[in-house]
Image (tube, helix red, strand yellow):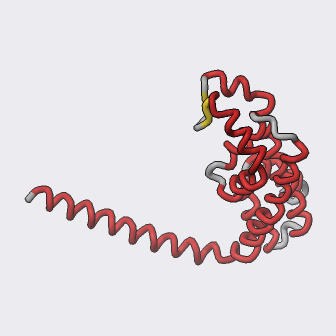
Amino acid sequence: MLQYKYLIFFPLVVIEGPIVTVAAGFLAYLGYFNVYILYLVAVAGDIVGDVLYYSIGYFGGKRIMSNGRFLWIKVEQVQKIKNHFDNHFGKTLLFGKWTHSVGGAILVASGIVRVPLKKFIKFNFIGTVPKTLVFLLVGYYFGHAYAKIDTYFGYITIAMLFLIITGATSYYFTRKR
């Protein structure tokens, strides 16, 4: 890891950028990484990963849509999505980059409707640069607090378990009566 750190980090960011970037930010805090090089590698890895999603849609779109749909996208809706992307692509992609819940689908849909690659990379870069910085800084500045945060999560878990048991017990005895 110490010898090939950035070469190992890059493919991990391509696969799962945010989580790996936060963890690497913490490792940079500990001195294992140069935070500036880490940032550049994280941005590059995130963009490469997103281009791979785009490529899946671009080159495999017909096959993906062969069963009539992809996630929430039906074949009949592809033209509507293309029209939406023609008018609001930048906002839509940035929304997907920052929400993660629909990000992968938006990246694949971008390829399916054949958004120009240059436009895709431009808006992807605009969204990736600040997002990656935020995740890296979270890991760098708050990673050292992982033990304290873990303790709080333990308390929250115990409290939730208590509430669930209390609620289930109350429900059981209320239904018995």
Residue 2: image quadrant is bottom right
The answer to whether residue 105 is left or right of residue 161 is right
Rendered view: 146 above or below 38:
below
Residue 56: image quadrant is top right
Rendered view: 121 above or below 21:
above
Q: Residue at x 79, y 46 (%)?
A: 50
Rendered view: 113 above or below 27:
above
Front residue of 169/71: it is: 71
Q: Residue at x 62, y 35 (%)?
A: 73
* Rendered location of residue 89, percent (x, y): 76, 49
Quadrant in which the N terminus is drawn: bottom right
* Rendered location of residue 55, percent (x, y): 81, 35
Residue 70 in sight:
no
Residue 83 in sight:
yes
Front residue of 174/91: it is: 91
* Rendered location of residue 7, percent (x, y): 88, 51
Front residue of 176/67: it is: 67
Q: How many marks?
A: 0
The answer to whether residue 66 is left or right of residue 10 is left
Residue at the extreme left of the image, as rendered: 177
Quadrant in which the C terminus is drawn: bottom left
Q: Residue at x 73, y 38 (%)?
A: 82
